[in-house]
């Protein structure tokens, strides 16, 4: 059984020629640095949990498929993921286990640690003894928890992007601002009319946008 919840949000701007992408209303979010693993055993059943970062639902699903293929001989491969710095897109699966006994407990641990952009898959090797509903919930929860605790949790700053165009004659002023702000340039093109996309901490975007728009000839894209 799958449990899906996705919330989309947008903020309209009255100003024209302004384009910015905010990934979250909060300044910071927590995620995992890399892949980690946890193991839980109960009544001859073995639960192996693999936790790892994922930047999108598609990436999370691809990782789940890889794990399922790697542990193809396991009885179940249950999973959950959380995507987005607003923690507004998540999905979980019991993969044949009784409803609510696997995916939700895994997702519950992601929530307990306040993580996002993360996917956890737990494969089960059945030991021949049924664990019952409560036993399964505990097993999947503890396996997921062990995998998270085995990994390194990072606190990341929310990022935002800004795209704009400017005349070639304004290049010096633009580059001075970019270098002074230690901004990350995602793309750039230099011609008679130049273009650039930069990335910065989300809370720094509003004053940065004002400074960019103050440069003569700059147009911040719609």
Image (cartoon, grey):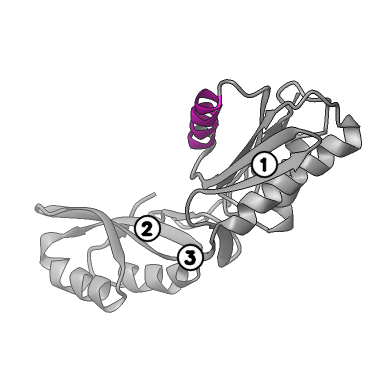
Q: Are marks 1 and 3 in contact (CB under 8 Å)?
A: no
Look at discs 3 and 2 and give the one toward the viewer.
3
Look at discs 2 and 1 and give the one toward the viewer.
1
Q: Is residue 10 magenta?
A: no
| Farthest bottom residue in view | 180
Helix, strand or loop for the magenta stretch, by majority: helix
What residue sits right under mark 3 in the picture?
202
Q: Earlier in the sequence, mark 2 or mark 1?
A: 1
Q: Which residue appears at 15% of the width and 66% of the height?
A: 171
Q: Which residue appears at 46% of the width and 61% of the height?
A: 159
Q: Earlier in the sequence, mark 3 or mark 2?
A: 2
The span picked out in magenta is 59-71
For residue 29, which quarter of the picture? bottom right
Instruction: Tell which of 128 and 216 is nearer to you.
Output: 128
What residue sits right under mark 2 in the picture?
162
What residue sits right under mark 1 in the picture?
7
Quadrant of image for the N terminus:
top right
Instruction: Tell which of 86 and 138 is nearer to you.
Output: 138
Instruction: Tell which of 209 and 183 is nearer to you.
Output: 183
């Amino acid at each position: 059984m799958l449990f899906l919840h996705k919330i989309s949000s947008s903020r309209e701007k009255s100003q024209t020629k302004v384009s910015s992408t905010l990934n979250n209303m909060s300044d910071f979010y927590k995620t995992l640095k890399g892949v980690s693993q946890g193991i839980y055993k109960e009544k001859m059943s073995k639960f192996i949990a693999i936790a790892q970062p994922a930047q999108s639902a598609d990436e999370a699903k691809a990782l789940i498929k890889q794990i399922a293929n790697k542990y193809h001989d396991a009885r179940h491969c249950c999973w959950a993921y959380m995507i987005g710095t607003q923690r507004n897109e998540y999905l979980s699966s019991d993969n044949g286990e009784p409803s609510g006994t696997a995916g939700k407990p895994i997702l519950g641990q992601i929530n307990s640690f306040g993580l996002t952009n993360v996917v956890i898959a737990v494969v089960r090797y059945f030991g021949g003894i049924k664990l019952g509903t409560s036993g399964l919930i505990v097993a999947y929860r503890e396996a997921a928890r062990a995998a998270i605790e085995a990994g390194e949790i990072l606190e990341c700053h929310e990022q935002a992007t800004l795209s704009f165009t400017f005349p070639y004659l304004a290049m010096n002023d633009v580059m001075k601002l970019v270098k002074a702000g230690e901004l990350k340039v995602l793309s750039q093109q230099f011609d008679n009319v130049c273009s650039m996309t930069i990335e910065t901490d989300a809370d720094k975007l509003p004053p940065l946008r004002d400074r960019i728009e103050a440069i003569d000839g700059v147009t911040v894209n719609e």
